[in-house]
Image (cartoon, rainbow, N blue to C red):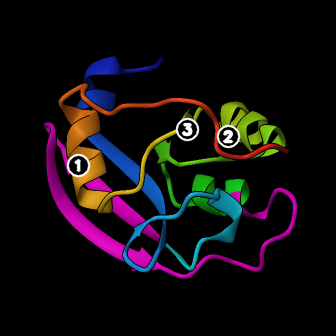
Amino acid sequence: MFNKKLYEMKMKFAVPVENGKLCPHFGHCERFAIIETENNNIITEKYINPPMHEPGSYPRFLAELGVNVIISGGMGMKAQELFGQNQIKVCVGVNSDLPKSLVEQYLKNELATGENLCDH
């Protein structure tokens, strides 16, 4: 059974980054910022290299890491569908900022999303 209270207590975010900030296109990132939170507070922030970019590789990779939320500027529809199949929430149309700042905005329900910056 899904335990909503536990889910809200601990979360893991993935933010695709380029030059230290959110990369406008999910599939073109240099690294992923993986940020873990507990009780709406950031407890860890680390950067990892993604696997080779092939269709379906990033969703599989991030699902295996236990990611709950992706914050992205733009992402293809197929990737969004694959994340949805893994119960991973996707936020698109987010403006570039530092990953930690974006997660803090999300936790305060202040993260501004908009039009998907990816056209495929």
Label 3 sits on a secondary structure element that is loop
Identify which residue, 17 or 46, lies in the foreground: 17
Residue 75: horizontal and vertical position, in percent? 69, 47
- x 82%, y 56%: residue: 56
Disc assigned to residue 92: 3
How many neighbours does mark 1 have within 10 angstroms: few (below 14), some (14-19), or many (20 or more)? some
The residue carrying mark 1 is: 37
The residue carrying mark 2 is: 83
**Bounds of the magenta span?**
32-58
117 to 98, vertically: above or below:
above
Please state which amino acid type lies under the numbered disc 1. Thr
Between the residue at mark 3 and the residue at mark 2, the CA separation in whole angstroms equals 12 Å
Looking at the image, is mark 1 or mark 2 earlier in the sequence? Answer: 1
Label 2 sits on a secondary structure element that is helix
Looking at the image, is mark 1 or mark 3 earlier in the sequence? Answer: 1
Q: Quadrant of residue 109?
A: top left
Between the residue at mark 1 and the residue at mark 2, the CA separation in whole angstroms equals 20 Å
- x 30%, y 48%: residue: 102
Q: Is residue 117 left or right of residue 34?
A: right
- x 77%, y 34%: residue: 81
Q: Is residue 82 left or right of residue 71?
A: right
Q: How many marks?
A: 3
Residue 117: horizontal and vertical position, in percent? 64, 44
Between the residue at mark 1 and the residue at mark 3, the CA separation in whole angstroms equals 20 Å
Please state which amino acid type lies under the numbered disc 3. Val
Please state which amino acid type lies under the numbered disc 2. Phe
Between marks 1 and 3 in the image, the one whose residue lies nearer the viewer = 3
